[in-house]
Image (cartoon, grey):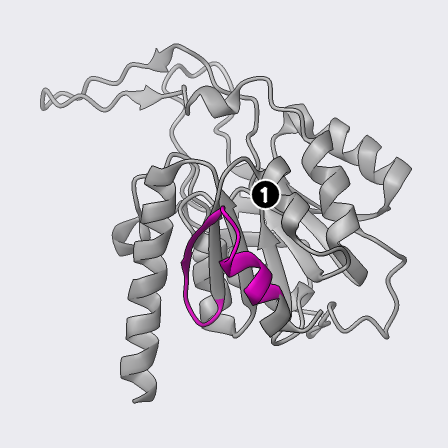
Amino acid sequence: MEINKLKEILLNSKYYYYHSNYTILLTGNCVEVMKIIPKESIDLVFTDPPYNISQKNKIIRNYRSGKNGDIILDFGEWDYNFDPHPFLELSKKLLNDYGSIIVWTSELLFGKYREWFKNNMYPKQLLIWVKTNPLPQFRLVGYRQATELLYWALKNKNTKANPNFIFLKQKEMTNVFYTPIVGGKERVKHPTQKPLSITKEIIKRHCRKEGIVLDPFLGSGTTAVACEKLGRYCIGIEVDKKYCEMAKKRIETETKQRKLFYD
């Protein structure tokens, strides 16, 4: 679909929240919002849905200095009883013939994604983020959780003609990404923020330049920031207004920096 026509539809919708040159941010329940997006208009659905791993308890950490460093395991009500099927069904309808879906997933939900992709799309590969600085295992009763998973599936079988799969050098094209947990200036107050470095690499490999990426669970806006940097269009959907504002500020910071650089 021609990008200007798509922009016209989204900017005039009741879900509109913010836009930049490359990003349109919509707010609302993604299952409802996705219904206004024209079918077969998306190159890549790349998103970080709820993991269903929240717990009401927390890990207590008391340092010798007296500081408290508790780890909260309750990410929010949105991380309980999440069913991925409705957004997956809509995502498939929105993909063009060369499109694919890449989802971050917990081990708990991985089987559900694998089964749905097997029955409805062309499941391709498991991708793995190896955290170079995983959280400590204070109780010493198990391994440190140093990995998170992504699953990649295509609407149709992949071929060399696919403009949305940009194959790099063999050395670079491994299914494992090594990078630290988000920290420093990149870190914002979102409990499940993913690294910009991995996000950029995946979008660069799975979406053509000037292509359209859809993130139905935009969160802190990492997908949008990556698209701004790479020259891909992003449609981001986020139900929580607090995170919409967080994403907006990150996008504005990126666009200002890019303007200063190119001007």
Count of number-bearing discs:
1
The magenta segment = 6-22
The amino acid type of the residue labelled 1 equals Val
Which residue is more in the foreground, 112 or 96?
A: 96
Indicate left or right for 47 with 70 as reference.
Answer: right
Residue 158 is one of the magenta-drawn residues? no
**Figure check: 60 above or below 19:** above
Q: Quadrant of the N terminus?
A: bottom right
Q: Quadrant of the rendered structure where residue 83 is?
A: top right
In the shown orientation, is residue 68 left or right of residue 18?
Answer: left
Q: Is residue 15 magenta?
A: yes
- The reply to whether residue 40 is in sight is yes
Q: Is residue 172 visible?
A: no
Whole-percent x and y of residue 128?
A: 62, 45
The residue indicated by pointer 1 is 33
Q: Residue at x 56, y 65 (%)?
A: 8
